[in-house]
Each structure stands twice: as C-alpha cells, then as structure tokens.
Amino acid sequence: MQESVIQWPLGLDHNDLAGAGVTAIVALQFASQTSTRQYIARRKQVPLSLRLRWVEQVFDAVRFVHSRGVLHADISCDDVFLDDNLNVKLGDFAGSRIDELAPLLCYETSHELPGEDISTRAELFALGSTVYEIMTGLKPYGDLPDHEVSAAFSEACYPDLKSVAAFRHTIMKCWRQSYVSAEEALCDIRVEVAAMKEPRGSRFCALLGHETVLVPFVLTAGFLIAFVGWVRSWRSF
C-alpha cells in the first residue's frame, strides 16, 4: 500500500491511501475544536485577538486554494475548522469547483451573492459574510427567512456594521464586489491587523516623530516651564 500526503497551508491535511484491490480512502486531519461556528456558539466570549487571527488565516487559506484553480463553493463558518492550537483549517471541499469541473454545492443564503454562479466574486461575497459571523457570532440577517435575506442582498441592503469591532471596510468591500481577488482583500486585512496590534504609545510617537527627537523636546519644555515659575515667584517678593 502506498501513502501520499498532500499539504494544504491552513487547510486540513489529506492522507490518500490506495492499494491494489483496495478502494481509495481519504483520511482527513482531525479538527479537534470543531468549526468556528460551533466554537463561538460554545464559548460566546471569544477574544478579539483570536478573531483577528481567524479572519487573516481564512483569507490566506482561500487565497491559496484560488491560486490552485479551486473555488470552494460553500465558504462559511461551518467549513472553517479549528485545530488544537485554534488555528484555522479550511475544509469540506467535496463538490468544490476544480479547474473547469462544475461545482456540486452552493453557498448558504446568508453567504450567497444573488444572481451569481460560483465565481471569485461569489467566493469573496461569502467571505464577507464569514468575517461578519466571526466578528459578531451571528449570520448576516440571521433572524430573517431565506427569501428576505436574498431580497435584501439583491437590493444591496446589508447589515449595519457599526457594532463590528474590526474589518468593517473589508466586509463591505466583499459584499459590494469591490475586490478583484482574495489576495487583494488579504492585504487590507493584514494592514488592519497590524494597526490594531500596534501599541497606542507607538501610534502617538509615530504622529509626533521619532522618540529620539521627542524626548529632548519634552525635557526642554519641562525646564522652561519650571524656570518661568521660578521667575514669577522671585518677582513676587
């Protein structure tokens, strides 16, 4: 029996086993922490830092599969799995579109671009809804029946993003089909993640200039203030 391992960055590892007279078997890596949808439902309070990481990783995973001529065709938090270290593993490619092979799946209504077949645009729209769910714990328009969700999306009416902690701009650009590729969206995401990780003090110093310039300025200003106070006190005698 021969064994081959296909490595998928940020995807479930596939172990294909086949032998003479043996039906081919595909053994998938075990996603011990289930899907992000199930994890969020169990934990309720998921740290923002973890959500930021998931969003970056899922876009990186989709970027990778798209570069290999694969369109997932069913992107949602149900197919974004988590390993022991709570890192994203994109899975469930049964029915995906591979090269010119027609897909056998379709997106959830809350993740589906109305009037669009499986395409890069449709994938990015689904990613927008996936990010929305990761950040809020809810599907877009999750309290509405499917036909009302489709009607809202058809009229370009999207959920309010004011309460979403991050990626509001990216989500809306995905929904409005403003991105050309997952790689383009990933660039925006990485910029926002880096900005949110940067300490507030560093941002303040970046606005005023380098710290080496700022420190002498502060010391000089402090000395002048003290000197003026001493002069005023001396004159009062």
Image (spheres, grey):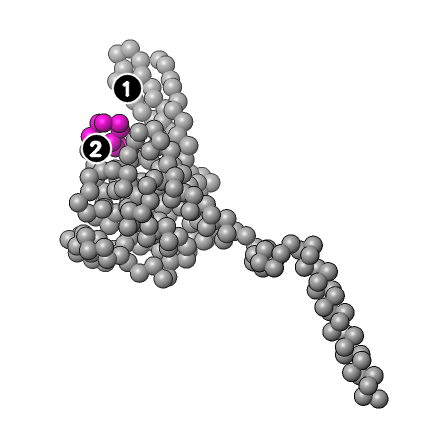
Please state if 179 lies on the left or on the right of 95 as rendered: right
Identified by mark 1, the residue type is Ala
- Tell me residue 216's x, y (percent): 73, 60
Above or below, 160 relative to 91: below
Q: Is residue 135 something that shows in the picture?
A: no
Q: Quadrant of the N terminus?
A: top left
The residue sitting at 45% across, 53% down in the picture is 48
Figure quadrant of residue 200: bottom right
Which span is picked out in magenta?
Answer: 93-103
Magenta span main SS: loop
Q: Name the residue located 79 percent from the left edge and 74 percent from the top edge.
A: 227
- Characterize the local packing of mark 1: few (<14), some (14-19) or many (20 or more) Cα atoms within 10 angstroms: few
* Residue found at x 56% / y 56%: 203
Q: Is residue 187 left or right of residue 111?
A: right
How much space separates mark 2 and mark 1, taking CA atoms?
A: 21 Å
Would you say residue 98 sits in the magenta stretch?
A: yes
The extreme top residue here reads: 20
Q: Which mark is residue 24?
A: 1
| Helix, strand or loop at mark 2 | loop
68 vs 24: above or below: below
Q: Is residue 179 visible?
A: yes
Name the kind of residue labelled 2 in the image: Pro
Question: Residue 16 at what x, y percent from top left?
Answer: 34, 21
Please state the total of marks drawn on the protein image.
2
**Front-most of 37 and 93?**
93
**Residue linked to disc 2:** 103
Q: Secondary structure at mark 1?
A: strand
Could you tell me residue 206's position as x and y percent?
59, 55
